[in-house]
Amino acid sequence: MDTLSGAVSTRELRAQLSDVLGRAMYAGERIGITRNGKLAAVVVSAADLEALEEFEMSQDVDAYRRAKSADDGGRVSLDEVQRDLAS
């Protein structure tokens, strides 16, 4: 993952938690947490999380608008769906 500032193992995290949180919070770093050598989680600042959530919401709104504009008004009944699934 190219956007990570660094990585620490879960063992190192126990000893460095305060430092890792400070780096994420104040320096805006994204620190990977590894378990058994594999990336398991990422510590990010609250600001990064909020930005990600805003981005996801804008993507959802855009997808909704595209779907709504492509809607031809045709509807399918529950019976038709169940019949299609059964065949």
Image: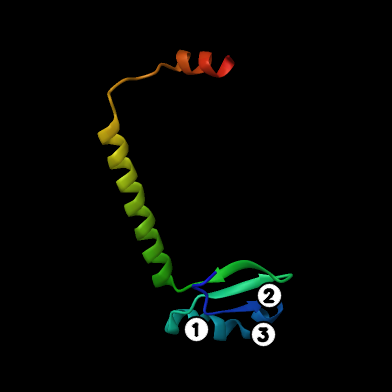
Residue drawn 68% across the image and 82% down it = 12
Q: Are marks 2 and 1 in contact (CB under 8 Å)?
A: no
Q: Residues within 10 Å of mark 2 (few under 14, many from 20)?
A: some
Q: Nearer the viewer, residue 22 or 71?
A: 71
For marks 2 and 1 on the same chain, the one whose residue lies earlier in the sequence: 2
Q: Residues within 10 Å of mark 3 (few under 14, many from 20)?
A: few
In the drawing, what numbered circle is on residue 7?
none
For marks 2 and 3 on the same chain, the one whose residue lies earlier in the sequence: 2
Q: Position of residue 63 (x, y in %)?
A: 34, 44
Give, as a three-letter code, the residue at label 2. Answer: Thr
Q: Position of residue 84 (x, y in %)?
A: 52, 16
Q: Is residue 59 above or below residue 35?
A: above
Horizontal arrangement in the rendering, residue 32 relative to residue 37 (left or right): left
In the drawing, what numbered circle is on residue 15?
3
Q: Residues within 10 Å of mark 1 (few under 14, many from 20)?
A: some
In the drawing, what numbered circle is on residue 10?
2
- Could you give the CA–CA distance between mark 1 and mark 3, rounded to whole angstroms? 14 Å
Q: Position of residue 4 (x, y in %)?
A: 52, 75
Which mark lies nearer to you, 2 or 3? 2
Residue drawn 30% across the image and 47% down it = 62
Name the residue that disc number 1 marks: 23
- Could you give the CA–CA distance between mark 2 and mark 3, rounded to whole angstroms? 9 Å
Residue drawn 37% across the image and 65% down it = 51
Give, as a three-letter code, the residue at label 3. Answer: Ala
Give, as a three-letter code, the residue at label 1. Answer: Arg
